[in-house]
Image (cartoon, rainbow, N blue to C red):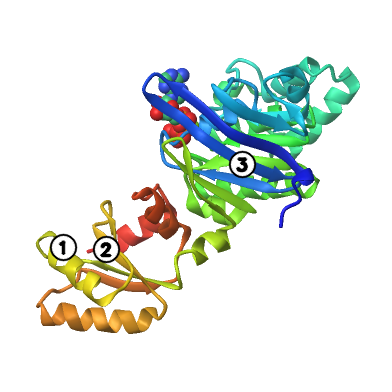
Amino acid sequence: MKDSSQSVIVVENIKKYYGEVKALDGVSLRVDKGKIYGLLGPNGAGKTTVVRALATLLVPDSGTVTINDVDAVEHPTRVRRMIGLAGQFAAVDDFLTGRETLMMVARLYHVPKKEATKRTNELLRRLSLTDAADRPAKTYSGGMRRRLDLGASLVGRPEILFMDEPTTGLDPRTRQELWQLIRELVAEGRTLLLTTQYLEEADALCDYISIIDRGKVVKQGTATQLKASLGRDVVEVQVADNHHAETLEIMKKISRSKPQIDEMNQAISIRATKGADMLIQLVKELDKANIKPKDISVHRPSLDDVFLSVTGKKPKSISSVKKKRGKK
Ligand SMILES: Nc1ncnc2c1ncn2[C@@H]1O[C@H](COP(=O)(O)OP(=O)(O)OP(=O)(O)O)[C@@H](O)[C@H]1O
Ligand SMILES: [Mg+2]
C-alpha cells in the first residue's frame, strides 16, 4: 500500500532505557512526504523521547532513525539542516522581543540580513505577532510564546517539522488557529510529526496515528481505521459504585465483546454492531436487576474509545470533559 521510497522519516525499532525505565522499547514508524503524523500517548508514554531521537538530540541505545535517507546518528548535522523543532516547552528568551528572537535564529541559520528581515516580518504576520513584535517575550501570553517558538522553528524553512505537544495548555480558539497554521504548513509541502495528548487533535489533523504507551507502539492506523477496529457502536453506562460489579456481569452476559472499564468516568462500555438493540437489551436487564443507571448512551466509537481499549485509560480530552458535565 505504502511506497517506502516516499517515507521521509523512517524509525526502525528504537530503544532507549534509563536504568529500569524503558522510555522507548522498540518503536518503529514511517512518515510519508507531505503528511501529518500523530504520536498519541499519555504522560510518560515516550513521545518526547521519540521526538528527541528524531531531532538528533538523543542517541537511541539501538535501532535506527533516518531522515530523507540520512542516518540521524551518523550525520546529525546534515539532518539538522532539514528539520525544525518546536519543543514541548516553548524555549523563548524572556528579554528578547519577538522580532529579535526570529532575527537571531535566522542569523544562526546563516540567512543573509535582508532575507532574514523578510522572513521575520512574514512569520510575525502569519503567527499574528506583528502587534507584539517589539515587546519583550516576557510580556507574551502562553499562546503567544508557543507561536513565537514555532516561528523560530520555521525561520530556517525546514521541510520536516517536529512539534511536541504544540497545543497543550492553549485555549480552544488559539488551538484552532494553530491547527489552521499547521494545515497551511503541510499544504505547502512540508512533512510534520506532532505529539499530542488530545484525541480530537489527532483526529482533526493527522493522516496517520501511532498510539504509544510505556515506550511501545500499541496501535497504528488512520483515525478512521482505528475507529473501525472497534466495531460499529459503543454502548456506555454509568452506575453507582455498589452496582458496578453486577452491571459488569450483565454486560458480559449480553455481549460477546469484553466490557471496557473507564475508571476516571466510572463508566462501563461495550461494543455492538447494533448499538440501539444492545441499549434496549441492557436497559431491560438493568431494570430486571433493579439497577438505575446514572447515565446510559450509545455512540459511534471515537478515538477516545480506541485509546481506552489499548491503554486502559483515557487522556485529557474535550469529550471526556463533556461527559463529566453530563453526569449528575
Ligand atoms: N533523561 C531521563 N532520565 C530518566 N528518565 C527519563 C529521561 N527522559 C525521559 N525519561 C522517562 O522516560 C519515560 C518517557 O518520557 P517522555 O518524556 O518521552 O514521555 P512523554 O510521552 O513525552 O510524556 P509527557 O506527555 O508527560 O510529555 C518517562 O517514564 C520518563 O520519566
Ligand atoms: Mg513529552
In the rendered image of this protein, does residue 325 appear above or below residue 158? Answer: below
Is residue 146 at least partly visible in the picture? yes
Residue that mark 1 sits on: 244
* Mark 1 Cα-neighbour bin, 10 Å: few <14, some 14–19, many ≥20: some
Report the side of 294 relative to 22 (left or right). left
Front-most of residues 34 and 168: 34
**Residue at image location 58% in from the left, 31% down from the top:** 51
Quarter the N terminus occupies:
bottom right
Query: Disc 3 marks which residue?
Result: 29
In the rendered structure, the answer to whether residue 237 lies left or right of residue 221 reads left
Are the two marked residues, 2 and 1, in contact with CB atoms closer than 8 angstroms? yes
Q: At label 2, which amino acid type do we have?
A: Ile
Callout 1–callout 3 Cβ contact below 8 Å = no
Q: Quadrant of residue 207?
A: bottom right
How many numbered marks appear?
3
Give the structural element (helix, strand or loop) at label 2: strand
- Position of the C terminus, as image quadrant, is bottom left
Determine the CA span between mark 2 and mark 1.
Answer: 9 Å
Which callout, 2 or 1, points at the residue further toward the start of the chain? 1
Upstream in sequence: badge 1 or badge 3: 3
Q: Residues within 10 Å of mark 2 (few under 14, many from 20)?
A: many
* Marks 2 and 3, how far apart at CA: 32 Å
Residue lying at 56% horizontally and 56% vertically, measured from the top left: 203
Residue denoted by label 2: 268
Pick whichever, 198 or 124, lies toward us. Answer: 198
Question: How far is disc 1 from disc 3 in space, using C-alphas?
Answer: 39 Å
Residue at the spot x=26%, y=61% of the render? 267
As drawn, 185 above or below 74:
below
Q: Is 230 drawn above or below residue 123 in the view shown?
A: below
